[in-house]
Amino acid sequence: KLDADGDTSITADTDDQIDFKAGGTDIMSLTATTATFNDGVFINVNDNSDVLTLTSTDADANEGPVMIFDRNSSSTANQDELGAITFRGRNDAAQGVDYIKLEAAIGDETDGTEDGNFHISNITAGTAKKYISVNRQEICLNEDGANVDIRIEGQDGQFTTDEYLVYIDASAG
């Protein structure tokens, strides 16, 4: 026990497993191959070094390392959000701003006909706008109607009269 009331401890009650408790709550367990955290994990560095590195030393041609975001709910429903990756920075008033956000959701959770939805949002003039949305029916560019041009580049040197393969001027619409 690590504190006066005995509710914080590091124990090895199970063979080949170390358990960490704080305030009587299981926080983490370690085995020879797995670290399991039962709450949020915060990793902080005070320089520009890598914060998290996932390394696979497997020599085969299969994918790896693999990161899985598993929303393991007993009551899934259409449009349930599955997870997000947010790129946050500070503005000139030192406020946290979510500049870019990747979001995934369930489009259809019916067994055998599952569909997924994916969105990329970007902050524009202080407001988050969906720039790319993907679902089973379409790929949508500029879903929230931001005043941005759309440009598709072609192969270098391929075009002699036009600079781009496709260019849509938002101000011309």
Image (cartoon, grey):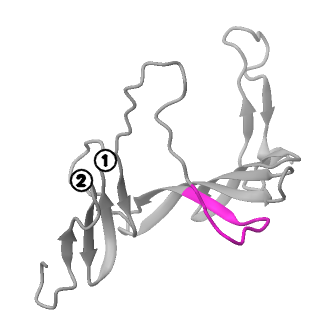
Answer left or right for 64 relative to 84.
left
Residue type marked 2: Val
Residue at image position (78%, 32%) is 167
Task: Give the structural element (helix, strand or loop) at label 2.
Answer: loop
Answer left or right for 122 relative to 158.
left
Task: Kindly indicate whether the residue at mark 2 contacts the one at mark 1 (C-beta within 8 angstroms).
Answer: yes
* Picture quadrant where residue 44 is located: bottom left
Q: Is residue 10 above or below residue 106?
A: below
Residue 82 falls within the magenta-colored stretch: yes
Q: How far, Cα to Cα, is label 1 from label 2?
A: 7 Å
Mark 1 residue crowding within 10 angstroms, few (<14) / some (14–19) / many (20+): few
* Picture quadrant where residue 17 is located: bottom left
Residue tagged 2:
45
Residue at image position (37%, 69%) is 93
Residue 51, numbered label? 1
Residue at image position (26%, 75%) is 21
* Picture quadrant where residue 90 is located: bottom left
**Residue sitting nearer the eye, 99 or 26:** 26
Tell me, yes or no, if residue 124 can be seen here: no
Image quadrant holding the N terminus, namely bottom left
Q: Is residue 87 above or below residue 164?
A: below
Answer left or right for 51 relative to 98.
left
Instruction: Read off the magenta span.
Output: 70-84
Q: Is residue 79 above or below residue 85?
A: below
Of labels 1 and 2, earlier in sequence is: 2
